[in-house]
């Protein structure tokens, strides 16, 4: 089961997360409220997510593996129970809504493509990812090998 995150824990990391996101996206920190969607609200692109996660990992000294949101949201559901032909099943959508409780219910479409889940990511989603990574580091098999330059 996913690690629970409190409002106080989110508040503790939010200022640094907001600064990192603002810097990565070239916007003012005043635009980076907890509820703001990164793609629809701040015009982030997938490459920006990689940059943001890299910066968060360095700042907070944590690892946030790609795909962790989906893996943790899926929980005990099998892959077939969670998604079918690239779309979340009803059970998968319920699990994602529970896991991403920071996202208002009206932002979830009735049919969610797995590849579109990042459209739901808010600033708070990244705050929660940092807190979860601090509380529960990923197992070694989720880590990508580090490369040296």
Image (spheres, grey):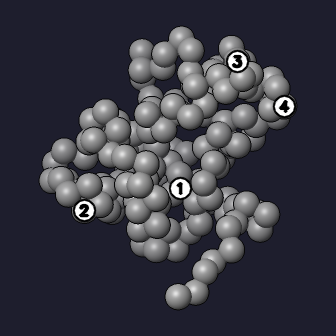
Give me the C-alpha separation between circle 1 and circle 3: 28 Å
Disc on the earlier residue, 4 or 1? 4
Mark 3: which secondary structure? loop
Secondary structure category for the residue under label 4: loop
Residue at x-position 58% and y-position 86%: 148
Q: Specify whether 139 is left or right of 35.
A: right
- Residue beneath label 3, please? 89
92 lies above or below 118: above
Q: CA distance from mark 4 to mark 1?
A: 26 Å
Instruction: Where is residue 47? Give x, y as percent.
Output: 41, 55
Instruction: Sort mark 2 into few (<14), some (14-19) or many (20+) by Cα contacts within 10 Å.
Output: some
Residue on which the image places disc 2 = 23
Q: Is residue 146 left or right of residue 119?
A: right
Q: CB under 8 Å between callouts 4 and 1? A: no
Marks 3 and 2, how far apart at CA: 36 Å
Q: Secondary structure at mark 2?
A: helix
Residue identified by numbered label 1:
131
Q: Earlier in the sequence, mark 4 or mark 2?
A: 2
Which quarter of the figure is the N terminus placed in? top right
């Amino acid at each position: 089961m996913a690690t629970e995150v409190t409002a106080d824990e989110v508040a503790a990391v939010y200022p640094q997360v907001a600064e990192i996101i603002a810097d990565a996206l070239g916007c003012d920190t005043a635009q980076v409220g907890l509820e703001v969607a990164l793609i629809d609200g701040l015009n982030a692109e997938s490459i920006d997510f990689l940059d943001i996660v890299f910066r968060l990992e360095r700042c907070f000294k944590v690892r946030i593996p790609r795909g962790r949101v989906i893996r943790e949201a899926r929980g005990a559901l099998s892959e077939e129970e969670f998604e079918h032909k690239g779309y979340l099943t009803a059970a998968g959508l319920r699990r994602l809504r529970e896991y991403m409780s920071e996202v208002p219910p009206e932002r979830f479409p009735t049919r969610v493509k797995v590849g579109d889940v990042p459209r739901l990511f808010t600033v708070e989603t990244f705050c929660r990812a940092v807190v979860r990574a601090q509380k529960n580091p990923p197992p070694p098999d989720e880590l990508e090998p580090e490369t040296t330059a």
